[in-house]
Structure formats: C-alpha cells, structure tokens
Image (tube, rainbow, N blue to C red):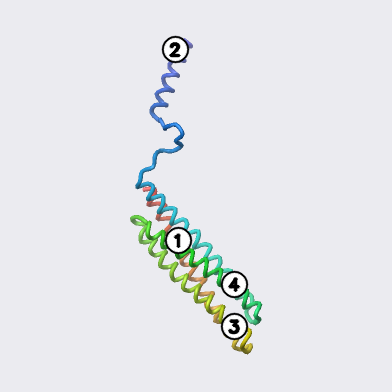
C-alpha cells in the first residue's frame, strides 16, 4: 500500500513539474519584444514622474527660501536664493528631458497623458529659467542699487519662484497621471 501511494505521489509531482516547466536558470517567463517596449515606456514614465517630483521639491524649496527672506535685502541672501533657483532650474531641465523621452516611448492611451506631461514640463522649465534669471538680477541689484530697487528685484524673484513652483506642481501631477496610465497600458 505504501508503495502504491509513493508511486502515485511521484507520478503526480512529475505531471505537475511538466505542466509548469521553466527552463533552468530562468526565473520568469520569456518576455516578448512588445512586452519589452511596454516595460521601457513604463520605466520612462516612472523616471519622468520621479524627476518631476524632484523638480517640484526644488522649486518649492527655492520659493520657500525666498518667502522666508522677504523684506531682507543682502547679497548673501540674494545669492542663496539664486543658488536655490539654479537648483530648481536644473531639476526642471532634467524633468523636461525625461518627460520628452517618456512621451516619445509612450504607447496607446498613455501617449496623450505623456505628451501633456512633456508640455507641462516645458512650461515648468521655462518658469524655473525665468525665476533663475530674476534671481540673478536680484543678486546684481543687491550690490549695485538702492534698497528700494533691491527689494523690487527680490519681489520679482519671489513672484517668479512662486510661478515656477506652481508650474512644477502641475507638471508633477501630470507626470504622475502619465506614469499611472503607462503602467496600466503596460499591463494590458
């Protein structure tokens, strides 16, 4: 009786092994070229989303630093704000590049969302560049001009940084939506 049970177990395990055979050393099923394209599009969208969040965080930090120093005018403060604005502009440029790559690789229904995210990234990048320009002008004005002119330049910088922050936030949300649609498109 024990032999019969043992033989049945061996036969059942052999049948189960043959039904779910995976080649030695292969941990997952072979991916098809179309699956690789979907995976690449999904990864590009996720990369754009991460870059968008970093750009939004950098823009928020620059705007916050500008708000905290409102009413104070000095070369050191203006330089610190300029550095924060430069960091935000660089992050926005990286996001713009990744969003453009994501839009070029997007498939199907996620294509529209990726294109919208790329357009939003361009707007955020332009706003960040404008804020950097205003911050650089504020640095020059803080040294060479009167307090009144320096405060006006600082206010223009704050306004530009707030616009950059808002544009970056919208672009980050757009990139998040595009990434979600890309992941869904990759599944289906």
Q: Residue at x 43, y 69 (%)?
A: 122
Q: Earlier in the sequence, mark 4 or mark 1?
A: 4
Residue at x-position 39% and y-position 65%? 116
Q: Which mark is residue 98?
A: 1
Give neighbour class at mark 1: few <14, some 14-19, many 20+ (Cα, 10 Å).
Answer: many
Give the residue pinned by disc 4: 83
> Which label's residue is closer to the chain start, 2 or 3?
2
Residue at image mark 3: 140
Rounded to the nearest angstrom, the CA distance separating label 2 from label 3 is 92 Å
User: Could you give the CA–CA distance between mark 4 and mark 1, rounded to whole angstroms?
Assistant: 23 Å
| Residue at position x 44%, y 53% in the image | 43
Q: Is 7 in front, or is 153? A: 153
Are the two marked residues, 2 and 1, in contact with CB atoms closer than 8 angstroms? Answer: no
- Residue closest to the eye, 25 or 107: 25
Residue 118 placed where, x, y %?
A: 41, 65
Residue that badge 2 annotates: 4
Label 4: how many Cα within 10 Å (few below 14, some 14–19, many 20+): some
Label 2 neighbour load within 10 Å: few <14, some 14-19, many 20+: few
Determine the CA span between mark 2 and mark 1.
63 Å
Please state the horizontal and vertical placement of residue 85, each as a whole percent of the image. 56, 72
1 or 3: mark nearer the eye: 3
Q: In terms of image quadrants, where is residue 17? A: top left
Q: Is residue 137 above or below residue 179?
A: below
In the picture provided, is 147 more to the left or to the right than 52?
right
């Amino acid at each position: 009786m024990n032999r019969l049970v043992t033989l049945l177990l061996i036969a059942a395990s052999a049948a189960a092994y043959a039904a779910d055979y995976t080649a030695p050393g292969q941990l997952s099923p072979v991916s098809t070229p179309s699956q690789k394209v979907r995976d690449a599009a999904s990864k590009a969208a996720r990369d754009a989303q991460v870059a968008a969040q970093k750009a939004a965080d950098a823009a928020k930090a620059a705007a916050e630093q500008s708000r905290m120093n409102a009413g104070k005018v000095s070369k050191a403060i203006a330089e610190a704000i300029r550095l924060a604005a430069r960091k935000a502009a660089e992050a926005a440029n990286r996001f713009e590049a990744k969003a453009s790559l994501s839009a070029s690789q997007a498939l199907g229904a996620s294509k529209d969302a990726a294109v919208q995210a790329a357009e939003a990234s361009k707007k955020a990048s332009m706003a960040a560049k404008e804020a950097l320009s205003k911050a650089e002008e504020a640095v020059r004005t803080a040294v060479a001009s009167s307090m009144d002119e320096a405060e006006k330049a600082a206010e223009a910088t704050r306004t530009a940084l707030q616009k950059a922050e808002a544009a970056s936030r919208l672009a980050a949300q757009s990139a998040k939506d595009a990434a979600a649609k890309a992941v869904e498109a990759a599944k289906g």
